[in-house]
Amino acid sequence: VMAAGGLRQRLVHLDLKGAPPRAAYLRQVLPLLRTLGATGLLLEYEDTFPYTGPLEPLRAPHAYSRQELQELLGLAKEQGLEVVPLVQSFGHMEFVLKHKEFAHLREVRMFPNALNPHKEESRALVKAMIDHVMALHKDVKWFHIGCDEVYYLGEGEESKQWLQQQENTPEKLCLSHIKAVASCMALSYPTVTPIVWDDMLRGISEETLAESGVPQLVQPMIWDYAADLDVESKGFVLLCLISVLLVWFASAFKGATGVNQSLTLIGHHLQNHLQWLKVASSTPTDVLQGIALTGWQRYDHFSVLCELFPVAIPSLAGCLQALENGGYSETVKENVEKLLGMPNLEIDTFMSTSLGTFPGSTILSLVTQVSFYLKSSVDELLERNRYVTGWFSPYHRKRKIIHPIIMHHFQPDAISLLSKWNAVVQDLQVAMEQVFHNSTVEEWMEENVHPSLQKLQQVVDDLDEAIKAQT
C-alpha cells in the first residue's frame, strides 16, 4: 500500500491558540485518534502552555496546568502516540510580542507578529520558551520551531541597516535566525531534531541553502492545504530540498477554507490528502519522515475562530483513514462511519445533522443546525415576510405603530421561532461547556449566534412594546 512506505508518521496537529479543548475532552479523544490511524500529535501550545517566571505573561487564563499536560502526555505515550511540540520562534509571535514586556523585541515597532532577529535578547526569549516546553517533554525526537509567514522581515530599523551591507539579503537574514534557533536546540538537546515550516525557504537557491548550514540542522515541513495541490510542482520543490534534507509534508483537515468557516467541507480536505498521497508515491521513502494533518483553529492570534475541533472530527477521520489505506474507497468510507458511529458520511455537502457516537458529536450536530438554519430562518421571517416588510418596518417599530391584524399574522411565528432557537442554543451551550472553557463558548456564540438571535429577540420585544402602546 502506498501509505505504508512514505507516510509512516501521521501527526495530528492540535492548534491550541483558539478554542483549546478541556484536558478531560482531549483524554477522550486521544484513543480515538489512535484508532483512526494517527501515530502522533503536533502540539501547538501558543498561549495555553503553563509558562512561569518571566514568561508568565504569555500564559492565557485558560492555559493547561502542568499536571493536566503531564497526564495528557502520559496518555499519549500509553497510546503509542509520538508527541512533537510546536513553539513559534520567528513569525506568528503575536502571543508574545503583544505584551508590553516583550514589545521591544518586535521586528517592526508597530506590528506584534515578527521577532527582531538582530537582538541577543530575542534568541534568549526563544530559548527560554523552548526550555520551558522541553522540561515537560523529556523524550521527544522532534521539536517544531515554526518559522512560517515571517511578515515584514527586513522592514525593521536594524534590518534595514543590516541589509545595506554588500552581501546581505532578506533570505540570509531569515536563514541566519533559523540557524541560530536550531543551533541552540542542537546544543541543549542534541537528540532532538528541529522541524520548520517550509514557506520561508521556498525560492531560496540550493546553493544559498547549502551555504547557510541550515539543512544539516532542520527538517522542513512542506505545507499545502489546497484541494487542487499541484503534484508536479511539489515534486520540483522536493527535488530542490531533498538534495540536502529529510522532509515532512503537511496537509489540512480543517481551518484552511475560510477565516470564519464554521462547518468543515470534507471533500476539500479529503482531496488535499489524496493529492499528498500522489506526491508521497513519487518521493523516495528514505527522505520522507511523514505528514502532519493540520487543523487550524484561528488564522492568527487575533483572528476569529474557524471550525471547532469536534465539528471537524469526521473530516479528520476520513483523511487519516485515506492516508492509512493509501486512498479512499467505499470500504474506507464504511469503516470511518463505523468508527464514528455515523449513519452516513457526507463528503461533498456539509454533514447532515445526524448524530455520531464520537466525543463531541452533539456539538457537530447542533453547530450544523445553527450554521445552516439560524440566519436563514431569521432573515426569511424579517426580510421576506410581507407583513413585516409592509406593516412592521423600522419606521413602524420606532414609532410603535401597529395594525392589530398584523399581530395575528406575525407574532405567533416570531415567538415560536425565537423559542425554537433558544432551545437549540441552550443545548449547544451545555454541550460546548463540557468540551470548552467559557471564554470559547462566549466567543463562538457572539460570532455565530447572537447577531441573528438578537435581531429576532428585538422584533419580539418591539411587538410587545407596540401592542402595549395600542392598548
Image: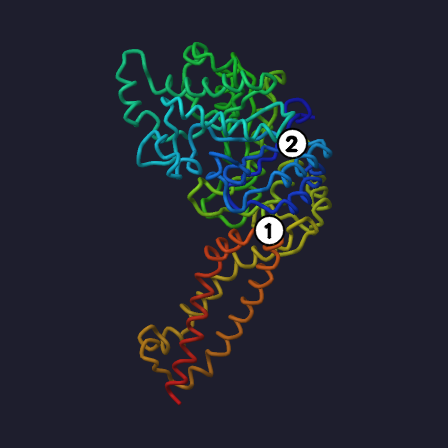
Quadrant for the N terminus in the image: top right
Coordinates of residue 177 in the picture (x, y in percent): 42, 20
Query: Relative to residue 346, is residue 288 depicted above or below?
Result: above
Under tag 2, what secondary structure? strand
Display colour scheme: rainbow
Question: Which mark is in front, 1 or 2?
Answer: 2
Amino acid type, mark 2 = Gly
For the point 52% across and 19% down, which residue is it? 218
Residue placed under numbered mark 1 in the picture: 351
Q: Nearer the viewer, residue 411 or 283?
A: 411
Query: Relative to residue 34, is residue 366 depicted above or below?
Result: below
Label 1 Cα crowd, 10 Å radius (few <14 / some 14-19 / many 20+):
many
Label 2 Cα crowd, 10 Å radius (few <14 / some 14-19 / many 20+):
many
Coordinates of residue 404 in the picture (x, y in percent): 41, 86
Amino acid type, mark 1 = Met
For the point 64% across and 41% down, which residue is it? 68
Locate residue 192: give its quadrant.
top right
Q: Does the residue at mark 1 contact the one at mark 2 (Cβ under 8 Å)?
A: no
Locate residue 70: give its quadrant.
top right
Q: How many marks?
A: 2
Q: Left of 410 or right of it: where is 335?
A: right
Q: CA distance from mark 1 to mark 2?
A: 26 Å
Query: Relative to residue 87, is residue 432 depicted above or below?
Result: below
Residue 153 numbered mark, or none: none
Query: Relative to residue 19, is residue 362 depicted above or below?
Result: below
For the point 37% across and 83% down, which residue is it? 402
Answer with mark 1 or mark 2, whichever residue precedes in sequence. 2
Residue placed under numbered mark 2 in the picture: 40
Q: Left of 421 or right of it: where is 26?
A: right
Quadrant for the C terminus in the image: bottom left
Coordinates of residue 189 in the picture (x, y in percent): 58, 19
